Amino acid sequence: MDKLSQMFSLQKELNKRIGVDTDSMDDDKRVEWILNYSRALGQELAELVDSVPWKWWAKYQTFDKQNARVEIVDLFHFLISLAQTAGLTADDVFDLYTKKNKVNHNRQDSGYEKKDESDNISMFAKSGE
């Protein structure tokens, strides 16, 4: 098992222990938990921001590298949970990530001068979605 698959497995186990079983959710529950995990991600991101001295007017702040690392790992927990709630496996995420990465490189190669989502649509069409 690769590391990403192992992380997905560990998160599924933790979520079930907490009482959240993404495998048995209907669409209404999926919507609820997508919102829950999105809010949690936002909060963890705010906690990450608080780990760095972002207040240019406050001289007392320091970079809390250890807390920043903890918050990044917390983001992974919720991001994996969100992916699982949306029905994505580790393999799905890897596949879609590599396709989107190629799209992003193509956008940079072409100058990315206008907003056009057709490349995203074609990315998903090729993966059977």
Image (cartoon, grey):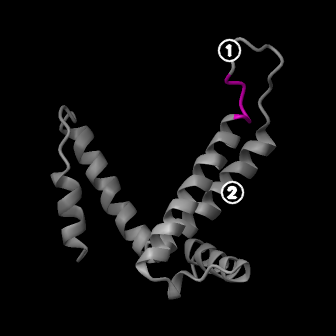
Where residue 93 sits in the image (x, y, percent)?
Answer: 43, 68
Mostly what secondary structure, the magenta segment? Answer: loop
Q: Looking at the image, which residue is at 59% across and 83% down?
A: 21
Q: Residue furthest right?
A: 60
Q: Is residue 96 magenta?
A: no
What quarter of the picture does the N terminus occupy?
bottom right
Q: Secondary structure at mark 1?
A: loop
Question: Residue 74: which disc?
Answer: 2
Q: Which comes sooner in the sequence, label 2 or label 1?
A: 1
Left or right: residue 66 versus residue 26 is right
Q: Quadrant of the C terminus?
A: bottom left
Q: Residue at x 17, y 44 (%)?
A: 116
Q: Give the numbered dot on residue 64.
A: none
| Relative vertical location of residue 106 with respect to residue 54 in this rendering, above or below | below
Which residue is the site of mark 1? 56
Element marked by disc 2? helix
Q: Quadrant of residue 7?
A: bottom right
Residue 43 visible at all: yes
Q: Label 2 amino acid?
A: Asp
Q: Which residues are magenta?
A: 50-54
- Give the residue displayed 77% in from the left and 30% down from the top: 63
